[in-house]
C-alpha cells in the first residue's frame, strides 16, 4: 500500500513517536508539537493522544513505541512523505545551533559595548545592565533559534551573556586605566605605561586579567548571578499540560 515516497499513518506514527518523546522531554510546548503533527497528517485528537503517551515515556530508558491509539473517525492509513513529516516535527534538525550562537554573540557585543560606553560617558558603572545582558542574550538566542529551548541554547545564552559582561568590564577598565593619577596609588612609571599604551594594544587584555579581581565587588557577583539565572529561565523547558484520556 505504500510506495517509496510515502508511508501509512500507522508506520509513520511509530517512526515519529520517539521524536515526540524527545520533544516532550526537551519541554516543547504542547501546541507546537500538535501543530507539527497536524502538518504531518495527524488529526488533533491523534496528536493529543500521542503526546499523552509520550509524557509517560519521556526521559532516559523510554520503552518501545506503544500500540497506536487512533480515533474512530480517523482514516486507517494515509500516504505521507516521511522526510517532510520528520522535519516538520523536529525543526531543530534544520536550525542547528549556529544561528542561536550568532544571535547570542551579536547581542553580547552590542550589550557589552553599550554598557562600556555608558560607563565612559557617565563616569559611572550601572551594574544592573549586567542583569539585562542575560535577558538580551537569551531573547536573541531564542529568536535566532526559532523558539528552540533546552540545555544547548541555555548554555549558549549564558556563555554569551558572560562574554558581554566581560566586554563591558574590559571597556570600563581600559578607560579608567587611561585616566588614573598618582592619587590612585600608582607610581609615575606605571601611569606613563597606561597613558602611552594605545587603545588597540594587545597588552590590555593581560592587564585586564590581572586587574579584574580588584574591580569586582559583591554587587557584581549578584548581577552576574541574576544574568545567568535570567538567561537560563527564559530558555528552560516549558510545561506540557495535556492529560491522558481515560480508556
Image (tube, rainbow, N blue to C red):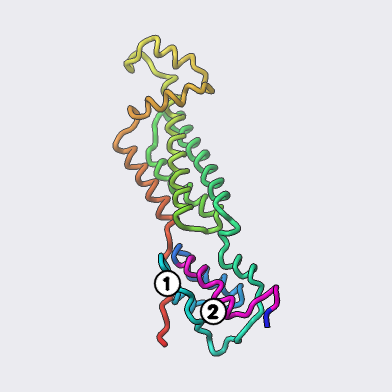
Q: Which residue is mark 1?
A: 57
Indicate the quadrant containing the C terminus: top left, top right, bottom left or bottom right: bottom left
Above or below for 87 versus 192: below
Residue at 64% across, 81% down = 78
The secondary structure that dominates the magenta segment is helix
Instruction: First in sequence, mark 1 or 2: give its number.
Output: 2
**What is the CA distance from the residue labelled 1 to the residue labelled 2?**
20 Å
Mark 1 or 2: in front is 1
Dot 1: element: helix
Indicate the quadrant containing the N terminus: top left, top right, bottom left or bottom right: bottom right
Q: Which residue is mark 2?
A: 44
Q: Which mark is residue 146?
A: none
Dot 2: element: helix
Which percent across, then down, holds residue 91?
57, 62
Q: Residue reaching furthest bottom?
A: 72
Residue at 48% across, 58% down = 149
Count of numbered circles in the view? 2
Q: Residues within 10 Å of mark 1 (few under 14, many from 20)?
A: many
Part of the protein shown in magenta: 3-24
Above or below for 123 versus 108: above
Which percent across, then down, holds residue 188?
38, 9
Q: Residue reaching furthest top?
A: 188
Is 117 included in the stretch rendered in magenta? no
Above or below for 61 versus 137: below
Which percent across, then down, holds residue 147?
52, 59
Q: Residues within 10 Å of mark 2 (few under 14, many from 20)?
A: some
Residue at 54% across, 75% down = 14
Above or below for 30 versus 170: below
Residue at 42% across, 26% down = 208
Is 18 included in the stretch rendered in magenta? yes
Mark 1 and 2 residues: CB-CB less than 8 Å, in contact?
Answer: no
Tell which of 182 and 134 is nearer to you. Answer: 134
Amino acid at each position: 500500500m505504500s510506495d517509496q515516497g510515502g508511508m501509512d499513518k500507522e508506520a509513520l506514527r511509530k517512526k515519529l513517536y520517539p521524536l515526540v518523546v524527545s520533544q516532550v522531554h526537551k519541554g516543547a510546548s504542547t501546541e507546537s508539537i500538535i501543530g507539527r503533527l497536524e502538518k504531518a497528517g495527524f488529526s488533533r485528537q491523534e496528536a493529543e493522544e500521542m503526546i499523552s503517551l509520550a509524557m509517560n515515556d519521556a526521559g532516559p530508558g523510554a520503552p518501545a513505541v506503544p500500540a497506536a491509539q487512533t480515533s474512530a473517525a480517523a482514516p486507517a492509513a494515509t500516504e505521507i512523505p516521511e522526510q517532510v513529516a520528520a522535519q516538520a516535527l523536529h525543526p531543530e534538525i534544520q536550525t542547528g545551533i549556529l544561528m542561536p550562537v550568532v544571535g547570542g554573540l551579536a547581542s553580547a557585543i552590542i550589550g557589552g559595548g553599550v554598557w562600556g560606553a555608558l560607563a565612559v560617558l557617565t563616569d559611572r558603572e550601572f551594574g544592573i545592565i549586567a542583569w539585562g545582558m542575560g535577558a538580551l542574550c537569551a531573547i536573541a538566542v531564542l529568536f535566532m533559534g526559532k523558539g528552540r529551548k533546552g540545555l544547548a541554547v541555555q548554555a549558549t545564552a549564558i556563555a554569551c551573556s558572560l562574554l558581554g559582561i566581560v566586554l563591558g568590564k574590559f571597556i570600563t577598565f581600559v578607560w579608567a586605566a587611561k585616566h588614573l593619577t598618582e592619587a590612585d596609588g600608582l607610581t609615575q612609571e606605571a601611569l606613563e605605561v597606561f597613558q602611552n599604551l594605545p587603545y588597540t594594544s594587545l597588552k590590555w587584555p593581560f592587564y585586564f586579567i590581572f586587574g579584574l579581581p580588584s574591580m569586582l565587588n559583591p554587587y557584581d557577583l549578584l548581577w552576574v548571578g541574576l544574568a545567568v539565572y535570567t538567561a537560563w529561565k527564559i530558555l528552560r523547558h516549558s510545561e506540557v499540560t495535556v492529560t491522558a484520556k481515560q480508556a
